[in-house]
Amino acid sequence: MLTLSGVGKRYSTGDRALTDIELILPKGQVMALIGPSGAGKSTLIRCVNRLVEPTQGSIRLEGTELTKLSGHKLRHARRSMGMIFQEYALVDRLTVMENVLSGQLGYVGFWRSFLRRYPQEAVTEAFRLLERVGLSHAIDKRADALSGGQRQRVGIARALLQSPKLLLVDEPTASLDPKTSRQIMRLIRELCAERDLAAIINIHDVALAQQFADRIVGLRAGEIVFDGQPSELTSEMLTTIYGEEDWDTTPEPIDDEAVDDGPEASSYPANMPAMAAGSAR
């Protein structure tokens, strides 16, 4: 579905952020990007949707070469890539519903969006998505009145209103407490399964990546140094990715069934792979 071949990024300062990235992401797979700060995780995600311009290589989404697109064709291609941001990227003075409907900007254009003239089917879908992410009670609340977890749920609903084929998720739990972080990762995982969506999630928390991702890719200094299943991420490999540390000294995993996730949490099968090998924080 998504293929990256020889992708590199060098900034005008001469600093190289990515070197010869080779990745194939099949439909429906949830892939976590891990690695130390400055490893190139955010740059890689932003190269896919061209928020950052790669300096070399090929990026193909369902056969379309994204690096060759510009103008209208690039805007059209971005409809297929829903972006979920670390800092939510909501408009604080707008309501929850208005922020979600802004996910239709790529379809209705700026002026129709500015005048709140959205197709009825988009409004109906926005209501449905807000119910799915547990925010049907907050439709008319301003975004600045929400908690961090609620704001992230708005961002998820907004991305899904684009009807994307791919989710690009940049540090979705960085500003959240541990319980809310688990809820948000579980929700993203469930929604990808329900919609057969592929996702790339840039995340610092290794334990969350191991619990909720199908595949983990480790970056160090802009290069891929690990690509495999969560169960294959050993202490030795964590040392390769992050550097020397006692990765075997970790807290006991939280028993999911012992956690009261509250009325907004969504369920997830209890047989997920166990958390292992610690957090990168």
Image (cartoon, rainbow, N blue to C red):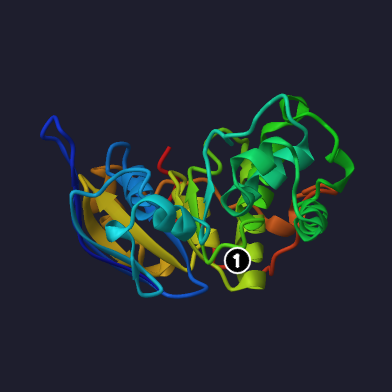
Q: Amino acid at mark 1?
A: Cys
Res 47 seen here? yes
Residue 203 horizontal/vertical position (percent): 45, 47
Residue reaching furthest to the front: 111
Side of 20 relative to 275 (left or right): left
Q: How many marks?
A: 1
Q: Quadrant of the N terminus?
A: bottom left
Residue reaching furthest to the right: 137
Side of 88 relative to 217 (left or right): right
Residue 223 horizontal/vertical position (percent): 20, 53
Residue 277 horizontal/vertical position (percent): 42, 53
Q: Which residue occupies the foreground of this view, 258 or 160?
A: 160
Tell me which residue sits at (41%, 58%) in the image.
Answer: 73
Q: Quadrant of residue 23?
A: bottom left
Q: Which residue occupies the foreground of this view, 198 or 59?
A: 59
Is 79 located above or below residue 118 in the figure?
below
| Residue bearing the label numbered 1 | 192
Side of 140 relative to 24 (left or right): right
Tell me which residue sits at (61%, 44%) in the image.
Answer: 181
Residue reaching furthest to the left: 14
Residue 40 horizontal/vertical position (percent): 28, 44
Tell me which residue sits at (15%, 33%) in the image.
Answer: 12
Side of 25 relative to 151 (left or right): left
Res 277 seen here? no
Is 62 located above or below residue 94 in the figure?
below
Q: Quadrant of the C terminus?
A: top left
